[in-house]
């Protein structure tokens, strides 16, 4: 949970947190506004904030340390995991890990919906009933279409928008439902 989220959860203003933790208000304001990164603060500052908020220093720093990879790399990793595990173990692990919910909570909607689309696609391919836990997410749709990098590059280089239209026509329905263009998830090296 981020510092602003923790403050909201504890119903604590910046002024109150600053006063109780003895972290200068300007420092706290810089952290909350994003001007200063929490992970670059002194251990004493992190300690004082974590103590006042009732969380460990690690819990306070965790959101700062997580790096989001490119969407193309994310897709590749998911496809490789599917290939390495096999269909049924992939379904089981995806449901057990519940990364779909974790991505949604982080507001990483492309990753959330891509993984859900993959889960639904593999479930359909193996006649496995869909997990109803994600029905609310199945109503979502990305505001703009996400095309594979190769499709975007080909369309740009050739100045031919029909390449994108063809990719849409060939897209796997489970992905297209979320405005993600994906046609081949099994052919990975």
Image (cartoon, grey):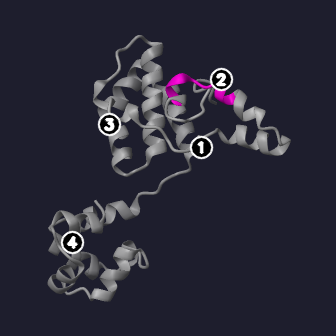
Residue plotted at (85% across, 41% down): 158
Would you say the residues marked 2 and 1 are in contact, meaning their CB atoms lie under 8 Å apart?
no
Q: How crowded is mark 4: few (under 14 residues within 10 Å), some or many (20 or more)?
A: many
Is 75 situated left or right of 135 in this image?
A: right
Instruction: Write down the residue under mark 4.
Output: 50
- Image position, residue 170 (x, y; %): 65, 23
Q: Which residue lies furthest to the top in this view?
A: 127
Asked which secondary structure carries label 4, the reply is helix
Instruction: Write down the residue under mark 3.
Output: 98
State which tag comes first along the sequence, 2 or 1. 1
Which residues are drawn in magenta?
A: 167-175
Instruction: Write down the residue under mark 1.
Output: 72
Asked which secondary structure carries label 1, the reply is helix
Q: How far apart are marks 4 and 1 (CA)?
A: 35 Å
Q: Distance between the residues labelled 1 and 3?
A: 21 Å
Decide whether the magenta segment is chiefly helix, strand or loop. Answer: helix
Instruction: Write down the residue under mark 2.
Output: 170
Q: Distance between the residues labelled 3 and 4?
A: 27 Å
């Amino acid at each position: 949970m981020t510092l602003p989220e923790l403050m909201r959860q504890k119903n604590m203003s910046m002024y109150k947190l600053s006063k109780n933790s003895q972290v200068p208000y300007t420092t706290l304001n810089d952290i909350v506004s994003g001007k200063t990164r929490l992970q670059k603060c002194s251990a004493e500052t992190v300690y004082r904030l974590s103590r006042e908020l009732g969380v460990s220093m690690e819990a306070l720093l965790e959101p700062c340390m997580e790096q989001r990879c490119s969407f193309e790399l994310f897709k590749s990793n998911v496809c490789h995991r599917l290939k390495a595990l096999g269909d049924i173990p992939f379904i089981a692990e995806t449901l057990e890990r519940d990364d779909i919910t974790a991505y949604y909570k982080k507001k990483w909607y492309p990753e959330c919906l891509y993984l859900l689309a993959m889960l639904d696609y593999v479930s359909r391919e193996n006649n496995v009933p869909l997990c109803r836990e994600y029905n609310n997410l199945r109503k979502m749709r990305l505001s703009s279409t996400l095309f594979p990098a190769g499709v975007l590059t080909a369309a740009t280089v050739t100045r031919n928008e029909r390449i994108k239209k063809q990719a849409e026509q060939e897209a796997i329905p489970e992905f297209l439902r979320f405005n993600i263009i994906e046609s081949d998830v099994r052919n990975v090296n």
